[in-house]
Amino acid sequence: MRKLFGLLITIALGVMIILALDKTSAFPKFGEVDLQERISSQYLTEENIEMVGSANIVTAIVVGYRGFDTLGEVTVLFISALGVAFIFGGTKQKRLDLKFKPNFMLRVGSNVLLGIILVTSLYIILHGHLTPGGGFPGGAIIASSVLLLYLADDKFRSNVKGFKLMEGIAGSIFVVVGLLGLIFATAFLENFLPVGTVGQLLSAGIIPIIYVLIGLKVGSEIAGVVDNFLTEEESA
Amino acid sequence: MIQYASIILFVIGIYGLFVSKNVIKMIVSLNIMEIGLNIFIISIGFVGDGAIAPIISSTQDLGLIFVDPLPQALVLTAIVIGVGTTALALAFAKTIYKTYNTFELDEMEESA
């Protein structure tokens, strides 16, 4: 009965959504969009690309035009990580046991893999303004390396205090870079460095700096969340 | 029509929220809803056959057009927020399991 009722409500809701969106500008026919009618076409003009200097236009929007929005986004992620730490609180933490005993090969192999994963994440973070990727995916890859060590080594405990320190420092420098924009330019988080040539590693002004900071912050936050999930309070 | 598919995904998520009484299944339903919405937002930025990702490269002289970059930037934000909410929800679920030894909402009422 419950399932039938739920099915009826959801079908009605789906029909309502489609009817409400149909033939409006929010529901264009797939693949038949004219970018010139939208504000997005201005992001793609030659002079605006030269002004921001980022080859990846999505990065230009996320960090360049909407940098303040990204600061809020990182804050939301920080608050949720804080909430997870608060729920799993308690001082005496011990890690969850593995069901098997990892042998020598697994431990050494995971350490070799750790280096490759960290180098890949650094590459993705540093080239956020040139290639797909950036601070958020790179940070998630950093956190995945912590998860790998937790799963492959039964003695491993991550340095939670170090993560918290790195997260706080990265977030603070992000705000400081924004305030420097207020001093050397006209607005918060405005670019005050030379833009350089589009497509080079050292270009786009403060965008690579901010994306590296975001990568470190996101990486340490998600690694802290992983650590919180894989530890529990010591039963006395 | 990928937009209808994304709306169907969203509706499947809502159905899961209505019907299931398992905490983990509810979190999975929330994630399905989120994926549906993300696909919808991305799909309204697609401009047509042959459009490429909005990254300036040496191939831009070939007369290719870029897709709309704004929905992609917004979905990047939405994915990160989704990770945060999912982590928090899973933390709640773990606490619930520790307290009641079950994920089912019905069994929790009986044992309370």
Image (cartoon, rainbow, N blue to C red):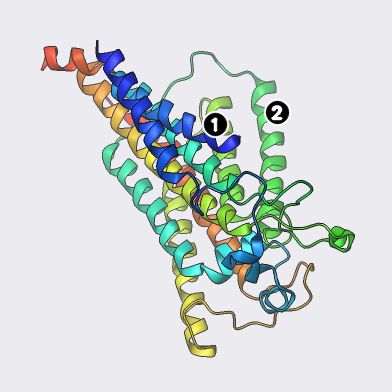
The residue type indicated by label 1 comes to Ala
- Residue at x 33%, y 48% (from the top left corner): A82
Asked if residue A17 lies left or right of residue A200, the reply is left
Discs 1 and 2 share one subunit: no
Q: Which amino acid, by three-letter code, is at mark 2?
A: Gly
Q: Residue A98: percent from the left, percent from the top?
A: 48, 19
Q: Name the residue rendered at 65%, 61% in the picture.
A: A35
Image quadrant of residue B19? top left
> In the rendered view of the protein, which quadrant contains the N terminus of chain A?
top left
Q: Residue at x 63, y 18 (%)?
A: A103
What SS does tag 1 mark? Answer: helix
Q: Is residue A168 left or right of residue B63?
A: left
Residue A8, quarter of the rendered image:
top left
Of circles 1 and 2, the one toward us is 1
The residue nearer to you, when weighing A199 against B111, is A199
- Residue depicted at 38% across the width and 54% down the height: A76
Q: Is residue A115 above or below residue A178?
A: above
Quarter of the C terminus of chain A within the rendering: top left
Q: Which residue is mark 1?
A: B5
Across and down, in percent, residue B71 comes to 56, 54
Q: Pinpoint residue A191: horizontal percent, then vertical percent.
A: 59, 79
User: Which residue has dot 2 on it?
Assistant: A109
Q: Residue furthest front?
A: A23
Is any part of residue A94 visible from this angle? no
Chain identifier of the residue bearing label 1 in the image: B
The extreme left residue here reads B112
Label 2: which secondary element: helix
Q: CA distance from mark 1 to mark 2?
A: 42 Å
Apparent side of residue B102 relative to residue A64 in the rendered image (left or right): left
How busy is the neighbourhood of tag 2: few (under 14 within 10 Å), some, or many (20 plus)? few
**Chain identifier of the residue bearing label 2 in the image:** A
The one of A164 and A32 positioned closer to us in this rendering? A32
